[in-house]
Image (tube, rainbow, N blue to C red):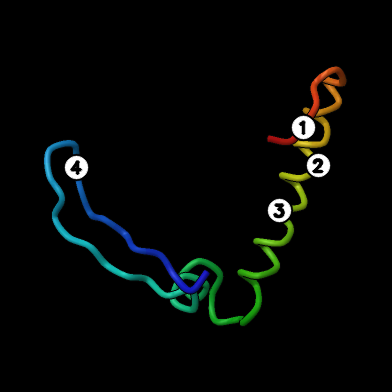
């Protein structure tokens, strides 16, 4: 992911768009220390994987896949 496109809007209209780079997001969210955003992302993915594994255990009869 290189960045995100943000739409400024309400329920009636869109006011504008802005592209926010990944580096800018990291600095605004986590400060000037490099790499913090990557660490937060990796930890979040691990937590999500753990949650999904626990949820899958609740349905042992179900088969994954397409």
Q: Nearer the viewer, mark 4 or mark 2?
A: 2
Q: Earlier in the sequence, mark 3 or mark 1?
A: 3
The image position of residue 28, as x and y in percent, is 45, 71
Q: Write the residue at 69% across / 53% down.
A: 44
Q: CA distance from mark 1 to mark 2?
A: 16 Å
**The disc label shown at residue 45, or none:** 3
Report the side of 14 relative to 51 (left or right): left
The image position of residue 50, as x and y in percent, is 81, 42
Viewer-nearest residue: 30 or 49: 49
Q: CA distance from mark 4 to mark 2?
A: 35 Å
Q: Write the residue at 73% across / 36% down.
A: 65
Report the side of 10 relative to 31 (left or right): left
Q: CA distance from mark 4 to mark 3?
A: 30 Å
Q: Quick one: which residue is furthest to the front in this view?
A: 66
| Label 4 element class | loop
| Label 1 element class | loop
Residue receiving disc 2? 50
**The disc label shown at residue 12, or none:** none
Q: Residues within 10 Å of mark 3 (few under 14, many from 20)?
A: few
Q: Nearer the viewer, mark 3 or mark 1?
A: 1
Q: Earlier in the sequence, mark 4 or mark 3?
A: 4
**The disc label shown at residue 64, or none:** 1
Q: CA distance from mark 4 to mark 1?
A: 39 Å
Viewer-nearest residue: 30 or 23: 23
Q: Nearer the viewer, mark 1 or mark 2?
A: 1
**The disc label shown at residue 10, or none:** 4
């Amino acid at each position: 992911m290189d960045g995100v496109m943000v739409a400024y809007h309400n329920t009636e209209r869109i006011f504008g768009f802005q592209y926010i780079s990944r580096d800018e997001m990291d600095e605004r969210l986590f400060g000037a220390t490099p790499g913090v955003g990557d660490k937060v992302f990796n930890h979040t993915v691990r937590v999500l994987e753990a949650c999904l594994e626990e949820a899958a255990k609740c349905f042992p009869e179900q088969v994954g896949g397409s």
